[in-house]
Amino acid sequence: MIDVLVVDDDFRVAEINARYVSKVPGFRVAARAHSAAQALAALERTPVDLVLLDHYLPDRTGLELVHQMRENGHRTDVIMITAASDVATVRAAMRVGALHYLIKPFTFTALRTRLDSYAALRRTVDRVGGHGVTGQEQVDRIFGALRTAPAPSSLRLPSGQSEPTTDLICDVLHQAGQPLSAHEVAFETGLSRSTAQRYLRHLEQAGRLRLSLKYGDTGRPEHRYAWVAP
């Protein structure tokens, strides 16, 4: 299990990020912090594998926090999750060793992609670690584990559709563990059936859902949608 420290000055955002992390298999939230001081204290109390770190904290920047972590002997991995999108901050994050840099706002899928690649990195390092790096092939395998594919254009939302609603529908189908109809999705999400149907159709066309038909005794077959694991 990969233990994660979620650091964000906004309590609501920290809660959302923590909920996202908890939904990714193999990850769990060990602690949360809303300032650099709280983050350092949390690291002293609870060793973690990964810090999801905001840059804009009330007492110092996220990058300053990383420097302090290293001075204190904490070698915990870091993924930046922040609204800071200027090149200087991105380059500085690279210099201090941030493994990924995710710009707010983002979707659950975007965060899960980074977490999955981080888990792949750890598995790769564990596999070669016992024998030592013996050549370029092993090095390439380690660095390649962190690569994430850009989101294909087919996942871009049509006009009038929102990422939070998309995530809500995906969450419902993921938790259901079985195909659901548009009517059932609408009931679970509180959306109208027509709205749920529009989102489901787009997600199915984008390859994120699998469509099946359920035939009854009479009438047209019912469309049912199932979650497709990334």
Image (tube, rainbow, N blue to C red):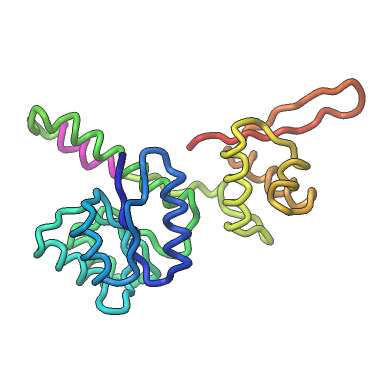
Residue 33 located within the stretch drawn in magenta: no
| Residue range (magenta) | 138-146
Q: Is residue 97 left or right of residue 73?
A: right
Query: Which of the pair 10/168 is nearer the observer?
Result: 10
User: Could you say which quadrant of the image residue 35 lies in?
Assistant: bottom left
Query: Which of the pair 113/43 is nearer the observer?
Result: 43
Rendered location of residue 150, percent (x, y): 42, 49
Rendered location of residue 4, percent (x, y): 31, 51
Principal secondary structure, stretch drawn in magenta: helix
Above/below status of 145 relative to 186: above
User: Could you say which quadrant of the image residue 173 lies in?
Assistant: top right
Q: Residue at x 11, y 29 (%)?
A: 130
Q: Residue at x 48, y 37 (%)?
A: 230
Residue placed furthest toward the front: 45
Rendered location of residue 159, percent (x, y): 67, 60
Rendered location of residue 160, percent (x, y): 69, 61
Residue 143 located within the stretch drawn in magenta: yes
Q: Is residue 72 left or right of residue 92?
A: left
Query: Which of the pair 169/163 is nearer the observer?
Result: 169
Q: Residue at x 91, y 28 (%)?
A: 219
